[in-house]
Image: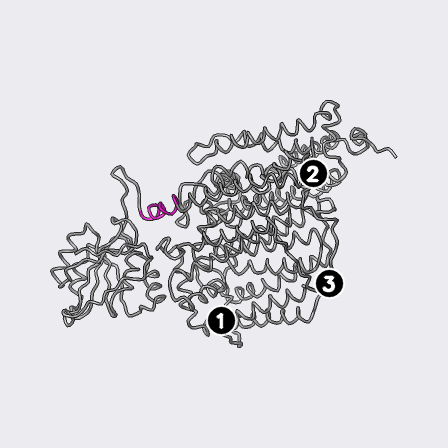
Amino acid sequence: MSHPSVEDSTQQPGLSPLATLSRWALFLVILIVLTVMLLDTSTIVRVGVMLVLVMPIALMMRGWLHRRTPGAWLRQHPWIDRHSATLAHGLLWFAIISFCAAAIQLRPDADFSTSIWLILGLIAIPIAYELRPWPPSKDRLRQATTYEHSARWALVAIGTLAFVLLTLVNLRGSEFKLNVWAQGMLLISGVVLVGCGFWGHWHGVRQRLNAHFVALILVLLLAAVVRLYNLEWWTMRWLDELLFSNAIVDLRQPDRILMLKPFSGITAFSWAYPMLQALFASILGPGLLPLRLTSAFFGILTVAATYQLGRVQFDKRVGLVAAVIMATLPVHLQFSRIGIANIADPLFGVLALLFVARGLRRPSMRDYALAGLMLGLTQYFYEGGRIFFPLLVASWLVFTRIFARQGASYTPPKLRHLMALAFCFLILAAPLYLTWASWDARMLPRYNTTRAIWNTSALNSVLEEWFERIPVVMRVFVQLHDYSWFYGGTQPILLLPLVPFFFLGIAHSLARLLKPGGSLLVGWIAAGIVGIALIDDAWSYPRYMVLLPGLALCIGLGAIKTWDTFNQRRDARMLSINARPAWIAAAFIVTIMHIGYYFGIHIPNFYEDQYGYKTQQGIIYRDDIEDALWRVLGLPPETHVHIVSGNKPWDFNIEAVRTYFYREDLTIETIDPQSFEAKLMEMSPFDHHAFFLSKEDDISYQLMTMYFLVQDRVYKSPFNIPEEATMDLYFAPAIWSLNEDDGVMQPDLPANASTDEQP
């Protein structure tokens, strides 16, 4: 039986791209006419009309896209058909060169002028796909098969009951009382019981010890080493970590805590993250290490989850490349080494996407239920993931249902699968929001605190500003550095050598937009950009944590699919063996580049970015009050501490240090140098006093020596920070103890800290 040729398929009715394009043009004209007619109406009405028109257009596009033969409209010309492979490779080379030029054009020290090379590259690769469709991935799954197991409803019911009890304990005016650790056990037991209820029968997976598995273990070990190295003392500055240390202090009275209430007006999240930190603090004692160790473990687990998502949605090579990127990416490293909750919600968001990806290939109640549980857990941490990941999952499912073609890579979920996802999400999220509603707490406190742009402008102005901010937010990935105190530095999220691969990944995702993997990456990054552009503080890197796994997967897809395209005619097994040294060398180069930049450039300059500012005479540092707060911990009991400086810290910081380290016996105050003498007159000589003075404040030194018998020594800072930033510590013992040892001790220090004292 003869088969129709490519040319024959283009002659079938309803498949002409020109005819379809004419229909699109007609709809576009109608859309423009209606928009012009509605110019005098409100923006909400115009947006509503456009949304109504989008759905029929989307359904028409879906019908044509499912019927069309890729590339038929190009290869109907005999010359193009004969040279399609050569033209496709030429376009791919053109795209690579264009993306390299775009990366140079968008480098951090360049003035942004145009992105023409980026646009040309993004056009070239989809045309190359049309000319020469890429072969299927080596790890592509067989035809999707449904694996359904009957749910164990008794376990689901008991788990749901645990969530109900947790809600009742946290509601305002509730008569049910449990300490916070019992509440945490209710949350954990509810998640475990519901998950086990939908799990079905366990099928063990035997992992063969091959080169790929060994590489994965090495990547995870690398991720652990670079996150745990010098974790406590890489910086002695508290990067919003005092908020979490103060929560740990409150957890010392567990009967008074309601787990689901926000633990602070600034960090308006549940108590889940501080409770994990408190467990480490109970073992290791108070300090920066237990705060940061929690973040390090979340960071390592996110690397593993990103690998799994890449393996399931694309193939294991994409997952491994993404894991290498995530393991060493400087921005992710930094937030894995800070004791704040921004690192937590991306883990559960990636896990939710992982289980949805598994469900789209081989639908099962188990995968969709686990996806719902992971989405529910995102609600207990930072607000970015709490808003972003549920919207991303919902839009991904809708888009694939409309446009994706059923096959080995996609099977649409049934109603029971979506109901399992929604049910598991709601039973986890409902206790949190019911609690907040009963206590009249705001549902989006951080989004309001950071001043979303709609809070300050009329709607028309908001839309105009929003569209202007979107291109600037896009440049944060490749050109603009962080403007917050959490990361700083001079480089963007992606270092320059990775930028062309990121662009390649975007282009390959656009060309694969009708497949779940392509639509996931495009939607992930696009949704993040438009959402962040709504925030007034859009240049702060904590906002971008939800996007980092997507960026890593995009880079992995760009590298692997480009490699496959150039080598599609070669033997896959021999190619894998021959390419192994090249991939090992590439991973080594990326690792050295990232780690070298982070530990060799970023961290050494991090303190300067925080406390110094450059002038023509050099770098001038402010008085480091946080250094002084560390040093007060070594003072004798019942000492009155006086920090004489115009750089006044928050009273909250002082109180948090005293309580977290069990030094409530100390009194700490900051005094303006202009009022120092008046304060000296009020001080009793029968108490211990410690004075922190700026190095060049000779007047305050003379006043201090007039009123007190100060020891003939000055205590220098033991930390490895610039001498100009430190304050000199003078100790004036009470007059009844002048002949006794002063009892001044240094705090616990890193091994390489300087402890020299100067007479």
Q: Estimate the spatial distance between the alpha carbons at disc 2 and disc 1, rounded to whole Å.
A: 54 Å
* Residue type marked 3: His
Residue 507 spot, x, y in % from top left: 60, 37
Q: Mark 2 and 1 residues: CB-CB less than 8 Å, in contact? A: no
Q: Secondary structure at mark 3?
A: loop
Residue 626 picture quarter: bottom left
Few, some or many C-alpha atoms within 10 Å of disc 1 (few <14, some 14-19, many ≥20)? Answer: many
> In this rendering, which labeled residue sits more in front, label 2 or label 1?
2
Q: Does label 3 or label 2 sit earlier along the sequence?
A: 2
Q: How many marks?
A: 3
Residue wearing tag 3: 149
Q: Is 672 displayed left or right of 234 in the figure?
A: left
Residue wearing tag 2: 135
Residue wearing tag 1: 180
* Residue type marked 1: Val
Q: Estimate the spatial distance between the alpha carbons at disc 3 and disc 2, rounded to whole Å.
A: 34 Å
Residue 547 visible in this rendered orientation of the protein: no
Residue 486 spot, x, y in % from top left: 41, 50
Q: Is 684 displayed left or right of 570 in the figure?
A: left
Magenta stretch in the rendered image: 600-611
Q: Residue drawn 66% across and 27% down?
A: 87
Residue 738 spot, x, y in % from top left: 14, 69
Q: Secondary structure at mark 1?
A: helix
Q: Estimate the spatial distance between the alpha carbons at disc 1 and disc 3, rounded to whole Å.
A: 35 Å
For the stretch drawn in magenta, what is the main secondary structure?
helix
Q: Does label 2 or label 1 sit earlier along the sequence?
A: 2
Residue 617 picture quarter: top left
Residue 652 picture quarter: bottom left
Q: Residue drawn 60% across and 48% down?
A: 310
* Residue type marked 2: Pro
